[in-house]
Amino acid sequence: NPSIGGVGKGHLVREIDAMGGLMGEVADASAIHFRLLNRSKGPAVRGPRVQADRQLYRMTMQKAIRGIERLQVMEAAVEDLIIENGTAVGVRTAAGETLRGRAVVLTAGTFLRGTILIGRTRIPAGRLARAVSRPRASSDASLSPDVLCAEPGRSGADGSGNMSPVPSVAYSAARAWAPWRPPTNSSALSARENDSESNGPLEAEEPSVGLALTLEKLGLPMERLKTGTPPRLDGRTIDWDNSALNLQPSEEQPVFFSFNNALRLTPQAPALVTCSRTHTTRETHSIVQQNLHVLPEYDGGDGTGIGPRYCPSLNAKVDRFPERDSHVVWLEPEGLNTHLVYPNGISGAFPPEVQRLIVRSIPGLESAQIVRPAYDVEYEFIDPRSLHHTLELRACAHLYLAGQVIGTTGYEEAGALGLIAGLNAALAVLGQPPFILSRSEAYMGVLVDDLVRKGTLEPYRMFTSRAEHRLLLRADNADERLTEQAFAIGAATAGRFERLQRKREALQRGHAELAACRLPAAIWAAAGFISKSDGPPRSAAEILSMPSASLDRLEEVVFAYRTQAPQQQRDSEAGQQPTVQRFDAMSPCGAPRTESESEVLSFDTEDCSSTAALPRNDGQRNDGRRNEWQTSDGQKNAGQTSAGQTSGAERQLVEPVAREALEVSLKYADYIRRQEADVKSAKRHEAAQLPLNIEYSSLPGLSNEEVEKLSTARPRTLREAAAISGVTPNCLLSLVAHLRHNSSNGKVRQDSSK
């Protein structure tokens, strides 16, 4: 999948970045489509998501990896572990080389006895071969690093890049909004990508069988899961002008992952793309239903396989929702220099001829050609309850596991686990205390705790609903939560920590400024913030804590009042009634108007919300970045333009780097206190008895997954319910409310045996 982030997943990427990880910066550098999911909802559940140019991402990441000091990369198939006296001390490769180390991190992905399935065809493999050839890293049989990172089938270096790729095409806002069209320069495409519908044998990367046998000998509980990928389409054969296709351009104001890009305004990639939305049809569903008998026979799940619940195959969706006539399909270009298109939403391991029928039953794809077929891969994973919270195996010291090999799905979950496993492997080698995050500190802490404590019966995907403290664990404050800890153990750089310190100082200044800014109630009422105009003066901080208030509009009101205050004072001295403003909520930026509908002020309202025109500290216009509003020595900008007019920076009470975090913290203060009380209530009632005859499907607020798992497990107490994978904190609160409602005295009955 060419996308990174989303609800829950985007939070993980922000946390990886806050701790010095590469994923956020590399995703930003290669992003060609931006979306902030759940924008209309609260900040706690908003999820940044980007679609990355696959080639740019690969090149940028490889360049970043090769630039890391004292890191040596070697590509080889890992066939066995070297274990001495119950401790992992190295690995053996398929070529017979021995690599010794003081710790081993295993991120085997889908390669442990992996099997690719297309219809009834079975191919022993972890994934289909990459489309590009690559030079193999030179091997050194005597290599003996402190920490070995074993990843069977890992990507090798296949090009050069940097964190700010040099554009082959200059970025153009006009091009960003144009419908995407496949490139016509065939020289930019690989030979494999220039094939039309593939009929020949598929190249595949061999599975890791020897490694699976070694892990089996350790007595580890292992099961099989599956994942799938949709077919890749030739974009030149798609009818992009079909009226059924709905365009989804990238958002005008990109939301970046990395806190290092917090003040950036423009994308780093050469251009942006526009995705398109289409949908399946009744004909599509009929084809699926008529060909269920030719789907693969899996080893797990009683022959049907165990795949991701929240990213199901097309056949699973048709079976699960028979009442629906269509399902959404997103057409996502894989890059700027390829004609490959990723049709998100139609994975399914049917035979190629059935896949062709399915694709061509979808509006806009009537003539589309499949370049690579969809396929499933079934693989073995290790029950994560076999691990410590450091992700070290209980059965083998200094052997750490991360990613799909312990039951997760997705790049973001794998990246977060890899970071935690790698940090703890390094800390163990250095003889330092382990690094463990709690559930109240990070989604990474929730992820690890869910896996290690509950295990998983299906590929685990992160959602914000899995966290008890999700109002605290927002994407906007990941740096405030984690960067200082990461810096203390040597993971985050000094520069990153200094940026955090500047943000914290800006937050303090912003809080002080808003608390000190007090306006008459009549002004706030005239602007529509409050209903009564005869109350005492109120601070800007009090007003901003209200749900409907925004920082941008609040600053406009404050600036308008401060501008008008001298005239009001003169009117008062002359015995005249001061001018009363009436703010029209429908006007741009909440521009103030007088009772006579004439403008009280004549400032440019566009400047109120735009930071692109703010001057730098040297007086020059910004180039793609927001102004810090503070000079390097900490002094406030003069806020005057060359013409003596007040600049946009002077109208801002809070500096750009702190605006989002400050506004959210003020609005969420009461909600956070309420959430903490709910968490304590659920904890207090852990021993509450659950009647065995509860009809979970009748309880409000429970997801289908929770209803299914609670109905199957029939837990006796709330504590047992909490231990079930997939049961969320909100579900537990719903159960407590149900018990109270059905109690004769309004109290929850506790299990006295616990």
Image: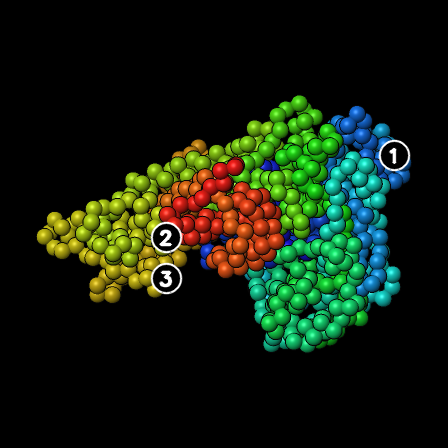
Q: Are marks 3 and 1 in contact (CB under 8 Å)?
A: no
Q: How far apart in space, not on screen, are marks 1 and 2 (Cα)?
A: 62 Å
The label number, if any, that marks residue 97 in the structure image: 1
- Residue found 61% across the figure and 39% down from its top: 453
Q: Residues within 10 Å of mark 2 (few under 14, many from 20)?
A: few
- Residue found 74% across the figure and 73% down from its top: 290
Q: Residue 748: x percent and y percent?
A: 43, 45
Q: Amino acid at mark 1?
A: Glu
Which dot, 3 or 2, sits closer to the camera?
Answer: 2
The label number, if any, that marks residue 588 in the structure image: 3
Name the residue carrying label 2: 547
Position of 323 with respect to 190 (left or right) is left
Viewer-proximal residue among 289 and 581:
289
Q: Residues within 10 Å of mark 3 (few under 14, many from 20)?
A: few
| Circle 3: element type | helix
Q: Amino acid at mark 2?
A: Pro
